[in-house]
Amino acid sequence: MMKVVACGIVSLLIGALEIAAPAAVSAVATPAFAAIPSNRPETVSEIGYRAEIRRTSYGVPHILAADVGSVSFGQGWAYAEDRLCDLADQVVKVRGERSRWLGRGPGDRYLSSDIAYRTLGLTDRAGQELPKLSAGARAMLAGYAAGYNRYLRTVGPAAVRGWCAGAQWIGPISPVDLLAYQQDLALVSSGRALLPAIAVAQPPGAGGAKDVHVPPDVVANAARRLVAAKGATAGVGSNGWAIGDERSASGRGALLANPHFPWQGELRLWESQLTVPGVLDVYGAGVGGLPGIQIGFNERVAWTHTVAPGARYTFAELKLAPGDPTSYRVGDRVLRMRAKTVSVPVREPDGGTVVLTRTMWSGAHGPIVDLSSLDPAYGWRTTSAVEYRDANAGNVRQLDFWLAVAKSSSVAEVAALNAKYGTAWLNTVAADRAGATWYGDAASTPDLSPAATAAWLASPIGLLDGSDPGQDWLIEPGAAAPGLLPASRWPRLTRRDYVFNANNSPWIANPRQPIEGFPAQLGEERAALPARARFNAMLLADPGPHRRFGLGDLVSAVLSNETLSSRLLLGPVRDLCREHAGSAGDGWRDVVKACAVLDGWDGRFSVHSRGSVLWRETMAGVLAAYPDALVAPGPLLSSAFDPRDPVHTPGGPKPDPKVLGQALDKARRTLEAAGFPLDVALGAVQHSEKRGRDFPVPGAPDTLGALDVAEYTAEPGTTTEPVVPPGAGGGLTKAGYPVNTGTSMLLAVQFTGRGPVAKGLLTFSESSDPASPHFADQQALFARGAVRDCLFAEPAILADPNLRTAVVSGA
């Protein structure tokens, strides 16, 4: 059952803001603020930055300042206190300087990364675009960088704690670095996967190709994860619900945000509140290095994002001019590729440095890539080359987007801001205090003609004909940038009951009103929902007799740890056990004890549940042989999908006795071989490791239809942080199930007559400093199925018994 700790009511902020004396002041603190006038401009004060950082229970920083630049200064400082290593590492990456400090890396990993980032030129482009940003965005970037740098100067690089302690590459950052990194984050669902393919691309016969030794399978595997589904989600996902007044217990809007991001590396989320009286008051979480709040709420509106499964890029086959591998035809014209010389300093094993210089090539729309390891036809040959074009190339709109959303007062405003700025690769789900909800897929998506769409669909990698001008991206009014789908063609839906997304196609944001007629590159229509998305839809459509959701219901939807597989199939499998256990053939002879375990299982993946490990291994055996068994008729479900009822079909749970008997027997043998009893508690097997300490983790794999996802990835982003544990796989071993990705945050918000009330959890905790009391405190909560209050209003913040305050300042 869900538990709540530190129970308290979040009050409405009224009247002028007065700051009480700090409970504790750091060594660098200055006297606390007096009351701060409202309506301050979003610019940096001439006397410098000044912010008050109030940390409440679990280390959550509530940052108060007189202007947006200063509140960002405080955010940059507080983030550096908690997670400096993550951002420092990423700045070195986007500068293309990893091999300067770390050498070529295994399989030339760092060298190829540096070549690709210097080819993309994110830092150069950031320098050009920075002056064009709004005053608010520039103030945020400048303040955040200054706060980060002021903290670093205060403690000194040698005293930085965390996984990068002692690293030579720790150093100050600039607003240009942050804007370059914002562009890099825009490429998470696209260009990041193609960095090796960019780095190895050279014209036929070019000698420079021998300077970089990236194993072909590294290039292929990175690209394959992206192109296999034409818009894969790069290993991240989310559940997002917006509840309207017709279904909310308060009669006002409510929101559930449940992102599934890695627990290691640069994509782990970080929680904070930013307050500029009269200008900004927003609570939530986001990725380090992005000033502001990306998922959260203010006094009037709450929003979350989920990764949109559509395409953020295209490839184009360039047909080369005879005898010239760097010229290509477009219609009746012959165009020259653009050459760019990149020079990368590389640390040698003896500590010296050499500079590797290469010429890299781009077409009119993007870099040339070498995908010959996927198929020789996709390499750079004498007759053709493949150009890569990214819908988020040069996307610097996101800071202004989230700053504007943080100030919004209704879902109508959120919808308008999505139309103005778009998102990089995200759906948006929002609810407001008036009880309206909104869903929209505003992710950057190529605008293709019907002919180009047909070519994209027909190609295994989404390859267009670069010689045909008719397959170029279209330019239409209303797009956030030239070549992108305009807002008029986005899937979007406003309702008073609910909308949701769980990384599924836009077709179903509410089964009562399917969205149809959107471009094919955004997803399928009238197709069965993936297991997790379907279970989201089922919980929303069949909520029980009360038919309204309160905060506890939103939290329990995730932390009750039921799955679609157990909801649909546990009863029928028990029936099979009663009929077949102990009988000869089809694996049933030796599963009497296993059946007894399932008979006593509660059907949940909580840490104390006994039977969940056996169920997971049984379902894994079925899904290994029948990958669509939970989304199509087969050995588990008997009736077909009906687009008129996407929530309850395919249905007819009817497990095949032969398939289930063999899978259950294999699961039994797997547990015994790993040394675990058949009724082992999930928490004794499934765990996350932090600095030598294991924490039990609830949840289940996405494939089982779990809202609370718990999985392992060997590549949590592009970090150089050591992956823990190295070499772990997805199956059960004597080490159990290591977890380092899945439910990363849970935020439930309900609007009331007294303001927003919120409960939350950052599953892997706020700090990466092993000496911090907030290094693992929320992981212990997560293991217990507990959440905490998200303190938003000033009285609640000041009443927190663990409040610690410091005022920080700098130029």
Image (spheres, rainbow, N blue to C red):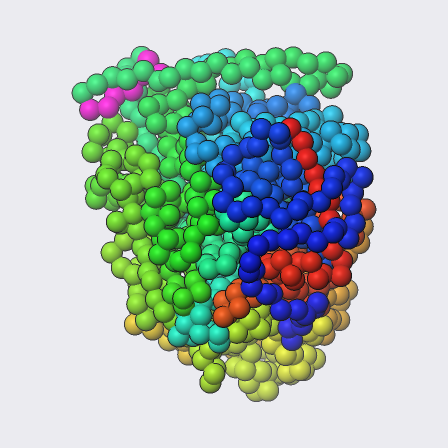
Q: Is residue 140 above or below residue 351?
A: below
Magenta stretch encompasses residue 326: yes
Q: Residue furthest bottom?
A: 579
One can see residue 655 in this view? no
Residue 76 lies in quadrant: top right
**Residue 349 vs residue 594, the one in the foreground:** 349
Q: Residue 228, image x and y in percent?
A: 43, 46
Q: Quadrant of the N terminus?
A: bottom right
User: How far from the left and from the top, in percent, is residue 760?
Assistant: 61, 62
Residue 570 picture quarter: bottom right
| Magenta-colored span | 324-331
Q: Is residue 42 visible?
A: yes
Residue in the picture at 22% in, 30% down: 468
Identify the residue at horizontal 65%, vertical 37% (top origin).
50
Q: Is residue 259 shown left or right of residue 411?
A: right
Looking at the image, residue 529 lies above or below residue 91: below
In the image, is residue 616 part of the stretch drawn in magenta? no
User: Residue 391 at x, y = what percent?
Assistant: 37, 37
Counting the numbered discs, the total is 0
Foreground of the two, 104 or 810: 810
- Magenta segment, prevailing SS (helix, strand or loop): strand
Q: Is residue 772 left or right of residue 438?
A: right
Q: Is residue 305 left or right of residue 642?
A: right
The residue at 76%/16% (across/down) is 350
